[in-house]
Image (cartoon, helix red, strand yellow):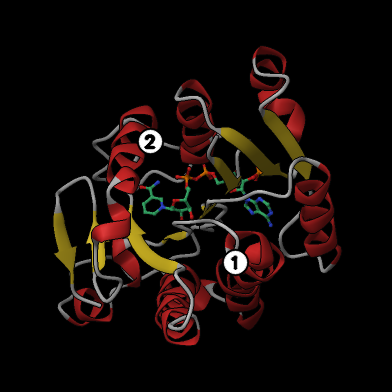
Amino acid sequence: MNSVLITGTSKGLGYELLKVFLEKGWNAFALARNTKSFSELTEKFPERCIPIECDITDDNCGNIITQTIYENGASLDLLINNAGNAEKCFGLENVNPSDLETHFKVHVSGTFRVIKSALSFLKQSDSPLIVNISSRKGSIQKIIAGEYRILIPYQVAKCAQNMLTACLNQELKETNIKVFAVHPGNLKTDVAPPDADTEPEEAALNMYNWIRSADKLPTDKFYDIMNSKNLEW
Ligand SMILES: NC(=O)c1ccc[n+]([C@@H]2O[C@H](COP(=O)([O-])OP(=O)(O)OC[C@H]3O[C@@H](n4cnc5c(N)ncnc54)[C@H](OP(=O)(O)O)[C@@H]3O)[C@@H](O)[C@H]2O)c1
């Protein structure tokens, strides 16, 4: 049976991804700061939905992840780094240096913390994948082109996460682990952009289908999976 770890499963895309993977028969480790928010899934799939309650910015989170996976079969094929924050502090005067740090701690060092704790399990899988949920707003080319309203902390953090993805693919070249950067779509969630046009449920199913054949795809592309095209980095 396949196993996935998804971060940020309390709501939005993460919650819908958790639901899809459970319904498709996967074992799912569901990481959230509030695991009660998906208790109906834990109750419906008591054997296969394993909650991990922690904050990915907390150093102890790594130990909790490692221990929970170890105690529940020690198997992992897929990691989806979905947890994300996007404070709407538009305008230079409304951005503080600490806002950049807050976003970096989730999208970059938080993501890296989860990856490090999951790595030894992924290495034992036949076809291990890491999917980092990035954003079109992390594309330097799109920002240069003036396509989006500037939201410095979020855009800088997602861009840095893309660099993390590229670095990890180099570092993991000798293994069979592939790391992808993916824009999931413009989603109608709590942090919906003005042009949100996709229900998170639809995006989650689309991502599930994309992931099923992702092991054949190159990792040097930035994937916009709802539109089946590549974004510029
Ligand atoms: N919405 C869009 O159009 C869009 C577009 C491109 C990319 N994305 C990306 O897609 C991902 C999911 O976004 P969404 O739209 O579903 O947003 P959302 O509804 O706000 O969900 C974000 C999730 O991340 C969790 N989270 C945040 N910080 C965390 C932390 N420190 N530790 C653990 N969990 C944490 C939240 O938990 P709490 O409930 O505890 O806050 C929540 O479960 C994010 O990475 C986002 O940047 C979204």
Query: How many residues crowd around disc 2 within 10 Å: few (fewer than 14), some, or many (20 or more)?
Result: many
Q: Are marks 1 and 2 in contact (CB under 8 Å)?
A: no
Q: From the viewer's perspective, is 8 left or right of 88? A: right
Q: Is residue 186 visible?
A: no
The circle drawn on residue 204 is: 2
Three-letter amino acid code of the residue under disc 1 = Thr
Q: Is mark 2 within 8 Å of ligand 1?
A: no
The circle drawn on residue 86 is: none
SS label for mark 2: helix
Task: Where is residue 81? Give x, y as percent.
Answer: 53, 56
Residue drawn where x is 80% and y is 51% of the image: 70
Task: Where is residue 230? Give x, y as percent.
Answer: 16, 64
Residue drawn where x is 86% and y is 63% of the image: 60
Quadrant (top left, top right, bottom left, bottom right) of the N terminus: top right
Q: Is residue 179 visible?
A: yes
Distance from disc 1 to disc 2, alpha carbons, whole Å, reads 19 Å
Mark 1 or 2, nearer chain start: 1
- Note whether 198 is above or below 124 in the view shown: above
> In the image shown, does 104 or 56 lie closer to the viewer?
56
Quadrant (top left, top right, bottom left, bottom right) of the C terminus: bottom left
Q: Quadrant of residue 30?
A: top right
Residue drawn where x is 76% and y is 43% of the image: 52
- The residue beneath circle 1 is 111
Q: From the viewer's perspective, is 230 left or right of 180? A: left
